[in-house]
Image (tube, rainbow, N blue to C red):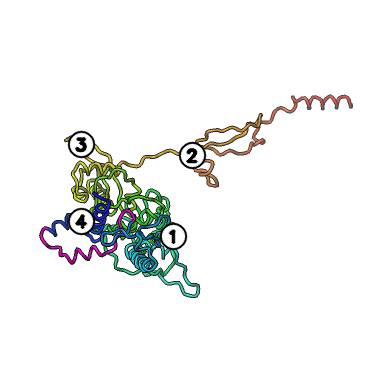
Amino acid sequence: MSETEIANEGENNIDLVQNGETPAAIENDAATGEVSNEETTKKQDELLLNPCGEIVWNNNIIARLLPNQPLFAPKIELLGEELNRDETANVVFERLYSWLDEQVRSELFALTRLKAAIDFVPNENEEPAKSEEPEQVATEEAAEAVAGEVKENTAPVKTPKLPLSDVAKALAIKVHEANGILDRALVEKEIHELTQDNRRELRNFGVKFGRSAIYLPLLLKPKAASLNAILTHYSKGKEGEVFVPRMGVTSFNAVDGVNQDDYILTGFKNVGGRVIRLDILDRVIDALFEASKEAKGPIAMPMAVVSLLGVSNEVACNVVEGLGWEKSTDEEGNVKWSLPKKRFVPRAPRNEVRSDANTGEKRFERKFDSKPRPQQNQGYGKKRKDKDIKPKTRHDYKSREESNIADSPFAILAKLKDNMGN
């Protein structure tokens, strides 16, 4: 294949992805005559951004992204002598930048809304607005019930009524810096510090506390995930083709050469060799916990897990094992799964520097933490309740038996003195 044919084929595939269709679906429609020439021409006339950072129009690559540019304000360069002429360059630039801006505002709406919440500063002259969120969140699991599909974005950018609290804002900044999708293991400490009010603040701006990640669900839509991955890739100064999942898939086998960060950026995660979309992964974990709660012990592979993943039972076992569940076999030879309990890990001993009393030389000693003695801090200032243990008292000198004073040396010397005086 020539370079032109390769470029045309790549553009066509991206065209199908951006318009919510797969190549197989288009081929079937063409075979049945359901795709008209007018629709095909319309698709070819649209501007497209392919995974190589190139803008394609009418099967021609007319521009490409420049590296190390802001995510929300990407820069481009025109390709071809005809477009770079003085009389056409300004018009083309204006058209392409207008199109890019529209793509960012519509597809990356969730990120722009979160950024508005982070940067919001209330006017000192205005009275602070009251929150209009009366509903109470009982538990994180109940509040984070995952919907079956990612909803389309039809709402405008939400104007904050109140500034984010310091704790909520700190986590919001980390989510935004991670382009809307952040591995939960990286911020587990910050999550535990959140109150229910802090969680509600972040949920108001689209942040979801998933089982394995903190993310913005609107970025899981195929077009949003593709644009987010491509712009992020080039804003960080990287080159080459960006990995973008095939349109409409919710899980697929891991691809060679693609790391976990690339999957996370597109809203997926590799678990046991199977790459799963984050919202589907949440539902898989929920199904496992629900089955374990009903069984009150080891469980067989839930059919809901196999159905959500759309895989064989063997592949589903690899996923469940990758999630940390332990595999066992009962007396009848049936495979069972159980989540291991967290084991107590003793604190590591710390080094302590001490100086030798004789030589003054410093040395390191290993000091192990131990529980304080009860009498040091538990019984201090309290009355002793143990009746068997007698409290210590001062020595009673009066109780001592009187010794024979006449036999003492002082008494004998006193008698001798008296005799000499007489």
Q: Distance between the residues labelled 4 and 2?
A: 64 Å
**Magenta stretch: residue 47 in it?**
yes
Mark 2 lies on residue: 371
* Residue range (magenta): 31-53
Q: Seen in the image, is 366 located left or right of residue 210? A: right
In which quadrant of the rendered view does residue 327 lie? top left
Give, as a three-letter code, the residue at label 2: Lys
**Magenta stretch: residue 40 in it?**
yes
| Lower position in the chain sequence, tag 3 or tag 1 | 1
Mark 1 lies on residue: 169
Closer-to-camera residue (376/207): 207
Report x, y in % for residue 115: 41, 63
Q: How far apart are marks 3 and 4 (CA)?
A: 44 Å
Give, as a three-letter code, the residue at label 4: Thr
Q: Is residue 74 above or below residue 91?
A: above
Q: Under tag 4, what secondary structure?
A: loop
